[in-house]
Amino acid sequence: MGRGKVELKRIENKINRQVTFAKRRNGLLKKAYELSVLCDAEVALIIFSTRGKLYEFCSTSRNLLEEELGSISTKELDQLEHQLDMSLKQIRYQDSIYARSAF
């Protein structure tokens, strides 16, 4: 017997929203760890809370910001940020279509 589907909409109650964020954040970090161990994959996960607090997971011991981003120019970072924004817009659009079709 599986779990019921959760309606994906913003949780209005601030306390419930924060509790849900903490639980889901921990679950996501655990899944990232499991994926890295089970599949021998390099996994990096970055989460920002609504207050801007950073939570991160990296399956390897290297520091991604120093090793990977140190040699990237400002222009390249801007391009990467634009790509990320476009990807997020596409995901949100697809999510909204999925949410409408689920009802």
Image (spheres, rainbow, N blue to C red):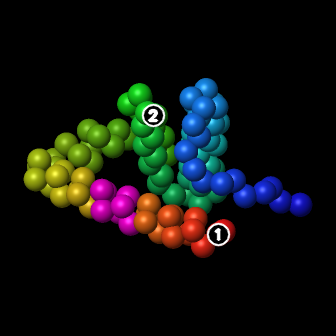
Most foreground residue, 48 or 93: 93
Q: Is residue 72 visible?
A: yes
Task: Judge from the rendering whether residue 1 lies leftward or rightward of residue 40; answer left or right.
Answer: right
Image vertical order of residue 83 relative to residue 81, above or below: below
The percent position of residue 2, horizontal first and vertical second, equals 83, 59
Nearest the viewer among 72 and 46 is 46
- Mark number, residue 61: none
Mark nearer the viewer, 1 or 2: 1
Question: Majority secondary structure of the magenta segment?
Answer: helix
Magenta span: 84-90
Q: CA distance from mark 1 to mark 2?
A: 28 Å
**For residue 51, above or below residue 29:** above
Image quadrant occupied by the C terminus: bottom right
Q: Say which element carries label 2.
A: loop
* Numbered disc total: 2
Q: Is residue 94 above or below residue 44?
A: below
Q: Secondary structure at mark 1?
A: loop
Amino acid type, mark 1: Ala
Asked whether residue 61 appears in the rendered view, the answer is no
Q: Name the residue located 44 percent from the left edge and 48 percent from the top edge.
A: 44
Residue 8 percent location from the top left of the image: 60, 53
Name which residue lies at 24% across and 53% down: 81
- x 16%, y 47%: residue: 71
Residue at 10% x, 53% y is 75
Residue 89 forms part of the magenta stretch: yes
The residue where tag 1 is placed is 102
Task: Find disc 2 in the rendering and name its residue.
Answer: 49
Residue 33: percent from the left, percent from the top?
58, 46
* Residue type marked 2: Ser
Q: Quadrant of residue 35?
A: bottom right
